[in-house]
Image (cartoon, grey):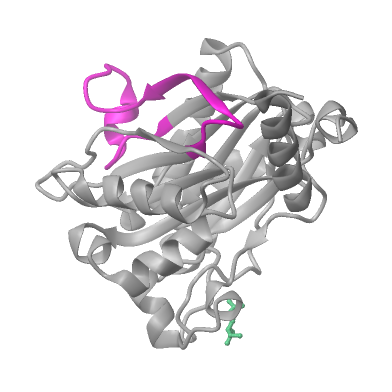
Amino acid sequence: MGQRFTLLLIFLGVQVGAGAFKICAFNIRSFGRAKAANRRVMGALVQILSRCDISAIQEVRDSRGAAIQTLLRELNRYDPSHHYSRLESKRLGRGSYKEQNIFVYRMDVVSVTDWCQFGDEDARNYKAFARGPFAARFHSPYTAILDFVLLLHHTSPREAAQELELLFGVCTELMQRWKTENVMLLGDLNAAGAYIPASAWAGIRLRNHLAFHWLIGDGEDTTVSHRTCCAYDRIIVHGEELLGAIVPRSAKPFNFTQALGLSEEEALAISDHYPVEVNLRLAPKAQREL
Ligand SMILES: *[C@@H]1O[C@H](CO)[C@@H](O)[C@H](O)[C@H]1NC(C)=O
């Protein structure tokens, strides 16, 4: 009964307590040093992110990278049962306004085996993206599917329809490059409301191709404000194996206003978006070992 056995029991206890492997996408509106210095905001963020095995974060805005470092430190302090690490995109954007997309993940549960940044210097039409999509390959021995790809993107609102169409090509390229069918596209795609005119939907292959499953439906509300009701943030899954590993009906926005008992104003100080999340089933082995 060595230390490793004890650690295994602690680990499995946490996993089975959670019941599943949770992935979220969260646009933390303009996450930079001001937010990182706000204790109430940071307190809420660690509560939200510590529920997830992988968090796909958007709108990280801090040229020196201090804000995300603070977030990781606070997260690891808040939840010492896991070790949280991160994988950062480039600083993305055409002008002086830059954003990063960042995967925050539990490195004791899941590992990154490869990653890929689209845009900028590649010769293809990916230059048409205001911010290049960012993809990573993950491997976990604890999930019902061992290997899967997450494609994280934050569309430019005014070009959302065009970018959604381009993402079809990005998905196809990723599947060829990494020889897999199992790709989950997630993030603030601005895929709702006035950003996608009704007439544009018909031309978006990602939407009409039967192999892509939109787990966050048009009727969901991923916005915090009471005045808006839009499904901007989405989770779209390709690959029967990945689809089969998903816990049915687990995909939904996480209403942290309600969960943390906040006022609308307090919630808006955290973000104007709710995270969207989905659960993967655990591997039979991970369950049986208890
Ligand atoms: C989130 O919860 C708050 C508080 O219960 C509620 O007023 C609001 O309508 C909910 N928002 C959504 C999008 O479900």
* Residue 153 in picture, x, y percent from top left: 42, 42
- Where is 157 relative to 87, above or below? below
In front here: 55 or 50?
50
Identify the residue at image location x=53%, y=54%: 50
- Quarter of the rendered structure image containing ligand 1: bottom right
In front here: 26 or 214?
26
Horizontally, is 66 left or right of 9 in the view? left
Horizontally, is 172 left or right of 102 in the view? right
- Where is 109 relative to 101, above or below? above
Horizontally, is 184 left or right of 72 in the view? right
**Quarter assignment of residue 239:** top right
Identify the residue at image location x=53%, y=77%: 229
* Residue 222 in picture, x, y percent from top left: 54, 67
Residue 22 visible, this orientation = yes
* Residue 196 in picture, x, y percent from top left: 47, 59
Identify the residue at image location x=42%, y=52%: 77
* Residue 260 in picture, x, y percent from top left: 55, 77
Classify the position of the N terminus by image quarter.
top right
Residue 232 visible, this orientation = no
Classify the position of the C terminus by image quarter.
top right
Magenta stretch in the rendered image: 105-134
Q: Furthest-right residue in view?
A: 288
- Where is 159 relative to 121, above or below? below
Question: Is residue 233 part of the magenta span, yes or no?
Answer: no
In front here: 179 or 60?
60
Identify the residue at image location x=78%, y=45%: 16
